[in-house]
Amino acid sequence: MIYLDNNSTTPLHPEVKNKIVSILDLYGNPSSAHQIGREAKSYIDEARKTIADFFKCLPEEIIFTASGSEANNTILKSASSCCSKHCSMGGKKHIISSVIEHPSVLNTLRCLEGENTEITYLPVDKFGMISKESLLAAIRPETSLISIMFANNEIGTIQPIAEFASIAKEKGIQFHTDAVQAVGKVDIDLSTLPIDFMSVSGHKIYAPKGIGLLFRRKGTHENICPLITGGHQEDSLRAGTENTIGIIALGEAFRQLKKEMNTEIPHLINLRNRLETGIKENISHVRLNGHPEKRLPGTLNLSFDAIEGESILLRLDLMGIAVSTGSACSSGSLDPSHVIMALGVEAEQAHGSIRFSIGRENTIDDIEYTIKTVKEVVETLRRISPIKLK
Amino acid sequence: MEKMGWNYSDTVKDHFLKPHNVLSIEESEYQPDGVGFVGSPACGDMMKIFIKVKNDRIVDLKWQTFGCASAIGSTSVLSDMVTENGGMTLSEAYTITPEDIIKKLGGLPSNKIHCSVLGDKALREAINDYYKKSGRVDLIPHDKESRVVCHCLNVTEHDIKMEVLEGVKDFDELQKRTKAGTGCGKCVSEIKQIMTEMVEKYYKDTIYKG
């Protein structure tokens, strides 16, 4: 199987897998004071330090969560319903976000709208970019939080997060970014990037599912309300006995990322560009969804006119290629991708969209086979389509 | 990695991969006696059915579909149903329901049912077209002139009114029966309004719950 769905999830890095196997017997509760507990705690501390080094932040600024979705939920719910006494965000009830956020942001915001919080959803242009002007225009005295994704999962468009975060800082508004897709693909240096909160997921960077993290900057906005209350794990901001193995695996994934990022990014760009030109040279009526340049290195989202995405996906699947689509038919709902629709295109373009997302294990042979196979599949489906291309 | 189970039955998969009776030549070359065209690219489903008729029997049927695997599979299976054993009579073909097609397909996932309701509609359109072309408009049982409200699933105002007259007063129930408004959803408020008006007119004391 040729796996071109790495924005959805990634396989374990072999070194992460080795690490997990080596620590499977580490059962101590990191909160226990005895040796067995302390041993588990020391592994967690080490992982936290590795990750903090990677981002150039403090270890205590990292809160481990079960997922990127949990990190997003923690921040958004904190901004909306937190008590003004304990939390730096309490009292103010306006959040600015965007129309192309991940469902873990959008659906959470929709819940908050029902609870007296006002939300402004910033629009995007045809490339999926949010403008500085629209952000400035949306800011109000009661704005407590701006939450904008670093890079989009479907189309890969990268937002000018440093610029947006500086605006927020200037206005005294807290800034959160969902960086789940950007980590490992874009340089994120928290010693210079003026963001307050950031969500990260492990399984997009070759760590296992079930582990993520929330960065929260100390000193300025350290008081947030926990989503899960209970014991005082993670500085009392995320109760529950730590996912020790997940955390250690995540630490290892970051250790590998630091070593490999500089070679992996050009590798992804090379393969992605070859895939893009190969498809465009061989197939007519193909459109790019997303920004031509300001885009994640491994992401290619294309719309094939006159045919529907699920049909393409399933035929590619049977030919041994795994991709994803923004078509309504594969989403479980009847609506096509909200991200592609937000680009201001016809619904047809969303129904015929396919996302190829390349990962570290893909090779040029994978890409050549994919170009050839996509051509066959598209031609076959166009032959049975009633829509005639000019 | 061995093949994992599909979301679809083997029949759907077979028809999706090797669709039967696809129109592979130009329409003008095929010279159909009737053509039915429903759906739109915006809704993600679009079907075109071409029939040839002899002595009120559909002796040949060809089709083209823009849509997902179940839309392609259901049109293909429908084309077999209509043409096997010398072909269905026009009146037999007119009564094919989505349920008949789904049964033939060995079932569909519940969120895919709407993809199969276009095939029978396109077929009825093709038969109506044949009646029109052969000067037998009086045989068209369907109120062909009624305004289409749900463009995704080709449900007319007449269809909705008839459903209400048959006792459907609940929007969910109407959707279950006609699939109206299950495509892009733009028509939902209009459908509800038509229903409300009809319910008020005919069932004054029954409150319509939207």
Image: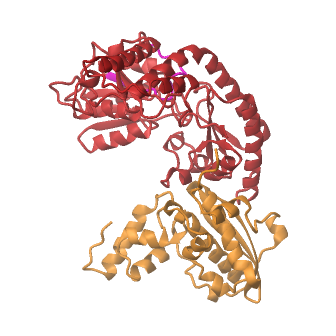
Q: In screen coordinates, is B138 left or right of A239?
A: right
Q: Residue at x 45, y 26 (%)?
A: A179
Question: The C terminus of chain B appears in which quarter of the rendering?
Answer: bottom left
Q: Colour of chain B?
A: orange
Which x, y percent locates residue A106?
39, 40
Q: Colour of chain A?
A: red
Give the quarter of the image for residue A340: top right
Q: How many marks?
A: 0
Give the quarter of the image for residue A86: top left
* A37 falls in the magenta region: no
Q: Residue at x 46, y 58 (%)?
A: B185
Q: Nearer the viewer, residue A340 or A138?
A: A340
Q: In screen coordinates, is A158 left or right of A196?
A: right
User: Would residue A41 be visible to someone looking at this image?
Assistant: yes
Which x, y percent locates residue A238?
28, 28
Q: Residue at x 55, y 33 (%)?
A: A10
User: Would residue A216 be visible to someone looking at this image?
Assistant: no
Which x, y percent locates residue A331?
51, 50
Tell me where the magenta segment starts and ends, as one range: A174-189
Q: In screen coordinates, is A221 left or right of B92?
A: left
Give the quarter of the image for residue A230: top left
Is the residue B35 above or below the residue B70 in the image? Answer: below
Which x, y percent locates residue A24?
44, 28
Main secondary structure found in the magenta portion: loop
Q: Nearer the viewer, residue A32 or A198?
A: A32
* A183 falls in the magenta region: yes
Q: Nearer the viewer, residue A145 or A207?
A: A207
Question: The N terminus of chain B appears in which quarter of the rendering?
Answer: top right
